[in-house]
Image (tube, grey):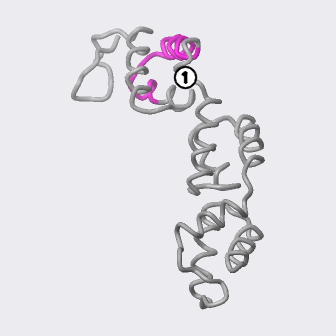
Amino acid sequence: MKRWNPRSSTLRSTEQSSPERAYQYALKLLAARDYTVAKLRAKLCDRGFDDADIEISVARLEAGNWLNDLRLAERFAETAVTSGRFYGPRLKLEMRRRGIPAAMVDEVLGRVLGEHDGCAEARSILGRRFPGFSYATADAREKRRVIAFFARRGFSMTAIMRSMRTEEQ
């Protein structure tokens, strides 16, 4: 029996929670950006909707293909890899942080990372991010800085060193 208050983020105690209100609020959230099922449930719960209303709304959104964890996981992984933002274990961590189920993360990463070569991706990023970098002429501090940059993004040490050394060729 809660009522929505535009000044607060919860429903007022005089207004009833309903599946339709939960659905409309979820659509409003999804219009701005994609959410995983888990994150959307948490958002609706934080807003004060009943668990039954949340489940009905989530089922309706999934049936209408507004909410799809697999689609979100594939988009996120592909974008993260091609932009060089995340790779390998760091990408897996970021996907799990966003509420994507572990089995789905493994499935999507197997497919996405299989399509991309870590060394080639690192070489591409090295050319964009550090255009004047030369492994042969760089001092130890500069090499450590470049290695740390790639390590934070989840690239393996093998891929990092290969990309840095083949940049000379």
Q: Residue at x 53, y 74 (%)?
A: 131
The region drawn magenta spans 43-62
Q: Residue at x 30, y 16 (%)?
A: 13
Rendering coords of residue 24 (x, y %) = 39, 15
Q: Tally the numbered discs.
A: 1
- Seen as rendered, the residue at the extreme front is 169
Which residue is disc 1 drawn over? 67
Rendering coords of residue 37 (x, y %) = 57, 27
* Magenta stretch secondary structure, dominant: helix
Q: Is residue 131 left or right of residue 144?
A: left
Q: Residue at x 41, y 8 (%)?
A: 20
Q: Residues within 10 Å of mark 1 (few under 14, many from 20)?
A: many
Rendering coords of residue 93 (x, y %) = 64, 50
Quarter of the image where the N terminus is located: top left
Rendering coords of residue 61 (x, y %) = 52, 16
Determine whether 62 is above or below 160 in the image: above
Determine whether 149 is above or below 8 in the image: below
The quarter holding residue 79 reads: top right
Q: Nearer the viewer, residue 154 or 58?
A: 154
Question: Looking at numbered disc 1 in the image, what kind of residue is underneath it?
Answer: Leu
Quarter of the image where the C terminus is located: bottom right
Determine whether 107 is above or below 53 in the image: below
Q: Is residue 11 left or right of residue 162?
A: left
The quarter holding residue 86 reads: bottom right
Check if residue 49 falls in the magenta segment.
Answer: yes
Q: Nearer the viewer, residue 146 or 17?
A: 146
Check if residue 55 falls in the magenta segment.
Answer: yes
Q: Residue at x 72, y 51 (%)?
A: 116
SS class, disc 1: loop
